[in-house]
Image: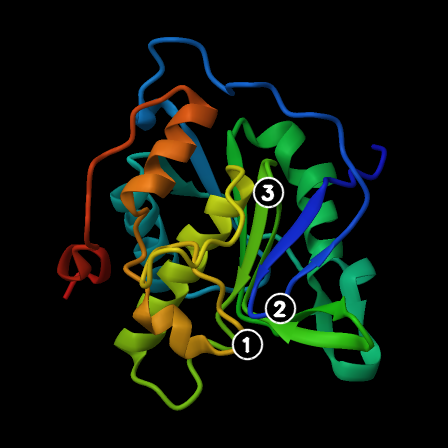
Amino acid sequence: MDRVCPAVLALLVTFTSIPSAPAAPKTRFPAGTRAADIDVCLQPLGKVDRAVLTAVERGVTAAYGFTARSLAERPLPAAAYYKPRKRWRADKLLDHLVAEVVPGAGCDLVLGVTTSDISVTKDEHRDWGILGLAYLDSQVAVISTFRTKRGVSRRTSLMRTVKVATHELGHALGLDHDDSVAGCMMNDARGTVKTVDAETGVPCKHEREAIESTLGVDLPDVTAMDWRHVLGR
């Protein structure tokens, strides 16, 4: 399959851009589509704890109302490995999802999930570690738990992972970074995971309305994540 090169490469912690992709349709789904009809598939890349996948599934459903499920584990693609830093190139992981997972998965959105460190090129930095990456207005995003768990409890790590997931899916649904309201899902991390900690993990009103306009689908009106349900504790 030809390499897909969407318009903006959107990520948490650092940001960059790449050449244009074909224009997306004005709305993605036909009239009458419900949020629950939209299928988000989590694609474990390498071994991922089932508790992490369950938390992300529940978080995605809580934030967007989408149906979320996990696919069978796949190995990280060798072509994405960056040997000098023992990391995996996030943009190549997205390309792998586009070429190898999206066509046969039957999913509206595919979210890659890995425990391995991921990175991109940013400005003069050849290899810049990140939490997540998405092609803007696309079907694919990828997140890593590697940087969510440094020096914090498992609960905090899981919360961060869920927030990174809903943020990156926001990019895939067409949202750019927006700092107009503090604590909103699409706030720019500005190089620190502490920004993630301050986010609710669910779309603010203006973010929800923007997604609804793009999808042509009503989303749940939620203002906070029910962490007891999402984390099962």
**Is 221 on the left or on the right of 183, as rendered?**
left
Q: Which mark is residue 141?
A: none
**x 28%, y 35%: residue:** 65
Q: CA distance from mark 3 to mark 2?
A: 18 Å
Q: Residues within 10 Å of mark 1 (few under 14, many from 20)?
A: few
Q: Is residue 86 above or below residue 218?
A: below
- Does the residue at mark 3 contact the one at mark 2 (Cβ under 8 Å)? no
- Secondary structure under badge 2? loop
Circle number at residue 191: 1
Q: Is residue 226 left or right of residue 76?
A: left
Q: What residue did someone put label 2 on?
A: 14
Quadrant placement of the C terminus:
bottom left
Would you name the residue on which mark 3 appears?
Answer: 140
| Residue at screen point 82% across, 44% down | 19
N-term-proximal mark, 1 vs 3: 3
Residue 93 is drawn in which quadrant?
bottom right
188 lies above or below 61: below
Q: Secondary structure at mark 1?
A: loop
Give the residue type at disc 3.
Val
- The answer to whether the residues at label 2 and label 1 have Cβ atoms under 8 Å apart is yes
Q: Amino acid at mark 1?
A: Gly
Measured Cα–Cα span from mark 1 to mark 3: 22 Å
